[in-house]
Image (tube, rainbow, N blue to C red):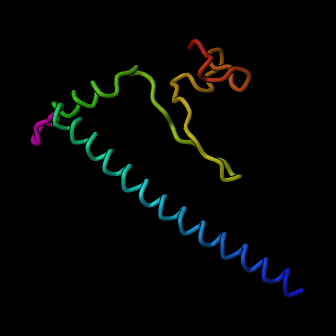
């Protein structure tokens, strides 16, 4: 019985040592990742400097350039009684008879 207990204790100690080594390796990898990310972001920021003081109009133009897309489509957040939530297309024709075929046709498949 003691032989089995000793072997179990020995195995548990080996597992603990391995976990410590893995934690140290993980910490080293995270630190290296942060260094690389910081270097990359510094290079990226240096190549595309944006003036600190922008007018509201310039900010809107910059935002529009960064997030190009349709002006008539945007997302609307929804939630139900079961606690689920998400985002779906907002549509001026939603639930309008003759134009909206919900729930038979999904919004992203609708041609209106």
Q: Nearer the viewer, residue 107 or 65?
A: 65
Q: Which residues are magenta?
A: 49-55
Q: Is residue 101 left or right of residue 44?
A: right
Q: Is residue 3 left or right of residue 67?
A: right
Q: Residue furthest right?
A: 1
Residue 17 spot, x, y in % from top left = 59, 71
Residue 58 spot, x, y in % from top left = 16, 31
Q: Is residue 78 left or right of residue 34?
A: right
98 over 84 or under it: above or below: above
For the point 23% across and 35% down, the residue is: 44
Q: Name which quarter of the figure residue 102 lies in.
A: top right
13 over 71 or under it: above or below: below
4 over 93 or under it: above or below: below
For the point 32% across and 45% down, the residue is: 36
> Where's the C terminus, which quadrant?
top right
Secondary structure, magenta segment, majority class: loop
> Where's the N terminus, which quadrant?
bottom right
Q: Residue furthest bottom?
A: 2
Q: Name which quarter of the figure residue 59 lies in.
A: top left
In the image, is residue 51 part of the stretch drawn in magenta? Answer: yes
For the point 51% across and 37% down, the residue is: 76
Q: Residue furthest top?
A: 111
Residue 108 spot, x, y in % from top left = 59, 21
Residue 51 spot, x, y in % from top left = 10, 37
Callout count: 0
């Amino acid at each position: 019985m003691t032989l089995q207990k000793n072997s179990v204790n020995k195995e548990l100690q080996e597992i603990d040592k391995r976990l410590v080594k893995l934690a140290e390796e993980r910490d080293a990898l995270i630190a290296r990742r942060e260094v690389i990310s910081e270097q990359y972001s510094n290079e990226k920021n240096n190549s595309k400097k944006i003036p600190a003081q922008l007018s509201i109009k310039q900010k809107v133009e910059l935002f529009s350039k960064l997030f190009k897309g349709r002006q008539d489509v945007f997302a609307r957040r929804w939630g139900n009684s079961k606690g689920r939530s998400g985002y779906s297309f907002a549509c001026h024709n939603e639930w309008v008879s003759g134009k909206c075929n919900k729930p038979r046709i999904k919004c992203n498949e609708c041609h209106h």
